[in-house]
Image (cartoon, rainbow, N blue to C red):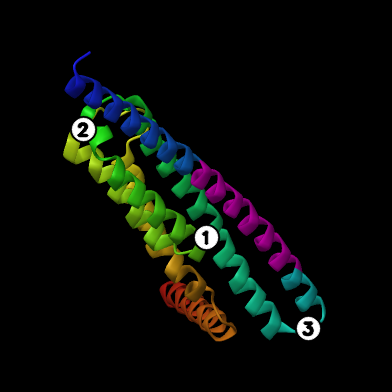
């Protein structure tokens, strides 16, 4: 085999090996995301239990704090699950197109994405995780590789929507004043309807 051809062959094998290592690293990150989801689910249950105990002790302020934590952990639980699904969808595409030269030539870029994603997971930065996985997906778009399985574009859209919702979920918990106002508004409406019916009969 000519020296140049042999060199290209060896470089190709090295790129493929490096890419396989990156795929393994991404699979480990996906498992970590699933573990984080389970931990958030456990934290949610623990917080809900503390809410009930605080209410039993007539400590409503403490109950509200734990209720906020429970809501946040529930949002994070679903976010981690969706991130893992989103990452797995992109991993399927990476596996399916492993032998494409364009994929192998971008091995270093995939490696930088792996490092960035690993850092985001360590910090618990959900927004950065999503942005990093988006970068991975954009590589497939740029290289026009075949899509396999779940539509990653739809998953990304749902993820961004979920992140926006999770940021406002805790603030959406009604306070006693809000609940009282809703009750008063409902009572006012009912009284108005009752007066209207009475006037109609007269």
Q: Residue furthest top?
A: 1
Q: Is residue 108 above or below residue 128?
A: above
Task: Name the side, left or right, on which 7 lies relative to 78.
Answer: left
Residue visible at 64% across and 56% down in the picture: 39
* Residue range (magenta): 28-49
* Residue 15 on the magenta span: no
Which numbered circle lies on residue 102? 2
C-alpha separation, residue under disc 2 versus residue under disc 3: 64 Å
Task: Name the side, left or right, on which 39 lies relative to 196.
Answer: right
Q: From this viewpoint, is residue 136 visible?
A: yes
C-alpha separation, residue under disc 3 versus residue under disc 1: 27 Å
Residue visible at 44% across and 60% down in the picture: 120
Which numbered circle lies on residue 75? 1
Dominant secondary-structure state across the stretch colored magenta: helix
What residue is disc 3 on?
58
State if disc 3 and disc 2 touch (CB < 8 Å): no
In the picture, residue 44 is in which quadrant? bottom right
Residue visible at 24% across and 26% down in the picture: 7
In the picture, residue 98 is in which quadrant? top left
């Amino acid at each position: 085999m000519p020296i140049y051809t042999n060199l290209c062959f060896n470089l190709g094998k090295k790129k493929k090996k490096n890419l396989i290592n990156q795929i393994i690293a991404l699979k480990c990150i996906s498992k970590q995301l699933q573990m984080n989801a389970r931990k958030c689910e456990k934290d949610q249950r623990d917080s809900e239990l503390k809410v009930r105990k605080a209410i039993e002790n007539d400590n409503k302020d403490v109950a509200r704090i734990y209720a906020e934590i429970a809501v946040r952990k529930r949002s994070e639980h679903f976010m981690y699950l969706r991130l893992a699904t989103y990452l797995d969808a992109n991993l399927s595409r990476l596996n399916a197109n492993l032998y494409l030269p364009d994929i192998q030539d971008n091995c270093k870029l995939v490696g930088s994405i792996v490092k960035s994603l690993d850092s985001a997971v360590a910090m618990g930065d959900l927004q950065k995780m999503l942005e990093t996985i988006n970068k991975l997906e954009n590589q497939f778009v740029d290289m026009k590789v075949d899509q396999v399985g779940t539509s990653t574009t739809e998953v990304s859209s749902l993820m961004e929507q979920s992140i926006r919702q999770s940021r406002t979920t805790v603030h959406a918990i009604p306070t006693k004043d809000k609940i009282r106002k809703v009750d008063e508004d409902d009572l006012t409406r009912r009284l108005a309807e009752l007066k209207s019916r009475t006037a109609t009969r007269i």
